[in-house]
Amino acid sequence: MTSPLQARSTTPSRRAILAGAIGGLGALAASAIGRPQVAQAHDPDDVRLGGANSATNTTSITDNSNSQTVLSISSTSGTAVYGSSTDWIAVYGTSTSSYGVQGVSSQSFGVYGTSGSSTGVRGLSNAGRGVQGSSTSSSGVFADSEAPDEAASVGWSTADSTGVQGYSNAGTGFLPAPKAKTGVYGYAAQDGSSKGVWGETTSGHGIHGQATSGYAGYFAGKVYTTKFHEMKEISNPAAPGTNKARLFVRDNGSGKSQLCVRFSTGAIQVLATQA
């Protein structure tokens, strides 16, 4: 006789199969909810430390919850961050209200940029300073060039303002307003020894001015010299404007130099003739 245990079928019922399928789908859905969502277009590998990484899409890290540093990279003796590009920008930083790129170093370069055929470092701002450099013990900004026909540092105002402005005032006060249509503007007003612009040379020209039709040098104040005033013989200049006179040296026609003055009327008066 067949026992009740032997007579029981070992085949699961349809109700059991359906319940198991529903439970499996629920577990799969729960596990999917717990996993972070991954963008459809991404590179297959994670970033690997100590090795080369290749990417075909942008790697983005965003923090919208606080003001902490998003990414920090440091090095004791090597380069902390290195950017390289064949024909475009190697490192690009942007900010709506602060510094686009800021670098600090105790012994070497805070920010170092190099390019084979274009600009090594470029700063751009819509409202603040494009590039700002500061130092507690050395130059805030230093420029050098090995090109024999290029300037080491260039300031260019494309809006008819000052190209280069220098200001000396012991860290107090505000930067004076620039001058319109001015290449170089220097300002210092601490005391009687202040110098807006200082030019120095051992045997050449400390300050050199050149003009085709205007004034090579224009002084709206007293002029002081510690040595002589030297002039070269020229032809009689044209008469000046009203209430003006022109002092010059000319040849008297006999090989002698004459010191002369010409007034606005056109009259020339000889002050002295070479003996």
Image (cartoon, rainbow, N blue to C red):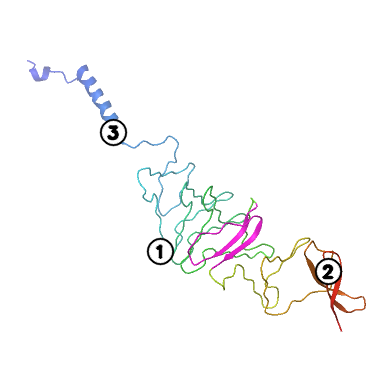
Residue 262, numbered circle: 2
- Three-letter amino acid code at disc 3? Ser
Give the image quarter of residue 270. Answer: bottom right
- Does residue 35 show up? yes
Q: Is residue 58 above or below residue 233?
A: above
Name the residue rendered at 22%, 21% in the picture: 19
Q: Which residue is mark 3?
A: 31
Q: Is residue 168 left or right of residue 59?
A: right
Residues shaded magenta? 160-189
Quadrant the N terminus occupies: top left
Q: Nearer the viewer, mark 3 or mark 2?
A: 2
Residue 76, numbered circle: 1
| x then y, percent, for residue 246 | 80, 68
Q: Residue furthest right?
A: 254
- Three-letter amino acid code at disc 2? Arg
Element type at mark 3: helix
Few, some or many C-alpha atoms within 10 Å of disc 3 (few <14, some 14-19, many ≥20)? few
Q: Is residue 206 above or below residue 152?
A: below
Residue 176, numbered circle: none
Q: Is residue 173 above or below residue 92?
A: below
| x then y, percent, for residue 182 | 65, 58
Q: Mark 1 to mark 2: distance in Å?
A: 73 Å
- Asked if residue 186 is among those painted magenta in the image, a careful observer would answer yes
Q: Are marks 3 and 1 in contact (CB under 8 Å)?
A: no
